[in-house]
Image (cartoon, rainbow, N blue to C red):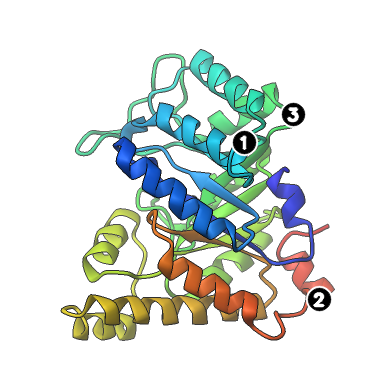
Amino acid sequence: MRIADRLAQPEACFSFEFYPPKDDLAVDALYRTVTELSELRPGFVSVTYGAGGRNRARTLEITSRIKSVLGVEAMAHLTCVGHARNELDDIVARLQADGIENVLALRGDAPPGLPFLPTPDGFNHASELIAYLRSRNRNLCIGAACYPEGHLEAASRDSDLARLKEKVDAGVDFLICQLFFDNAFFFDFVERARKAGISVPIIPGIMPVTSLEQIERFTRMCGATVPMRLRLQLERRQDDPAAIQALGVAHATVQCMELLGRGVRAIHFFTMNKSPATRLIVAALQGASPLPSPPSPLQQVERGDS
């Protein structure tokens, strides 16, 4: 199923993101995680590329197996990094032959310590990649990334929003947000995006905190802000991994309940290839009695429904 079609349904859509492991043993562990999370009936799962475009073959293999063997709708990430046009054509043809209808189109990150350089006969920006994919694959469902707090390389949030509008105009069907820990950033971003004429669905991205070191590493990479109150609570528990995970689950659950309560109908979880924290959160959301009512017509307009 095309993700855009799933997002048009009234039921809440929860989705999970994984990354391709480096060895076969870790791949087996990943499939166990996906199997465990599939019990929660995700709308879809996504599989990333490694930094610098590494692990692309494993990404394709895992995405196809999740779809064909595990029976879960899957989305592959595609990046500008390391890809010429003919390579992208081959990748998309393989994905479609395996029944994959959804891709997340990204510029991608350069190898650590190096500037981004386009591949010969490749692309400089995600908007170019999206336009190319759309011109050659009318039925492909294309997602793109967005940044509630602004991309680290953007001169300002306004300029970042202008670049996002270019991506959407190039042929995007939906957007997935970079992680955030304060919902105010998301709601402000959606309001600004709608005013800028961006009408496609915008899916918030949630990462449950499972360790202080992990969250510090990720926030340095993406520029997300950790609220001071949450940071202080994490620091008080830094020598107690179980307490940090419990706090992370509680914080993410509260985030999700507010998002759903204010009309959001889809949430994307960055799982770090582990199931316990995400399982606890989604099970709590699905067990809430009742789940928030479908959004009002005003909320539907705000999130881009037609």
Element type at mark 3: loop
Please say whether residue 166 is visible from this viewpoint: no
Query: In front of the other: label 3 or label 1?
Result: 1
Give left or right: position of 244 versus 170.
left
The percent position of residue 82, horizontal first and vertical second, equals 38, 24
Which of the two discs, 3 and 1, labels the residue nearer the N terminus? 1
The percent position of residue 118, horizontal first and vertical second, equals 38, 24
Quick one: label 3, few (<14), some, or many (20+) residues within 10 Å?
few
Q: Which mark is residue 68?
A: 1
**What residue is disc 3 on?**
138
Q: In the rendered image, which quarter is residue 42 located in?
A: bottom right
Which of the two discs, 3 and 2, labels the residue nearer the N terminus? 3
Contact (CB < 8 A) between labels 3 and 2? no
Which three-letter amino acid code belongs to the residue tagged 1? Ser
Q: Relative to 301, is 128 above or below?
A: above
Please say whether residue 41 is visible from this viewpoint: yes
Contact (CB < 8 A) between labels 1 and 2? no
Give left or right: position of 149 versus 211.
right
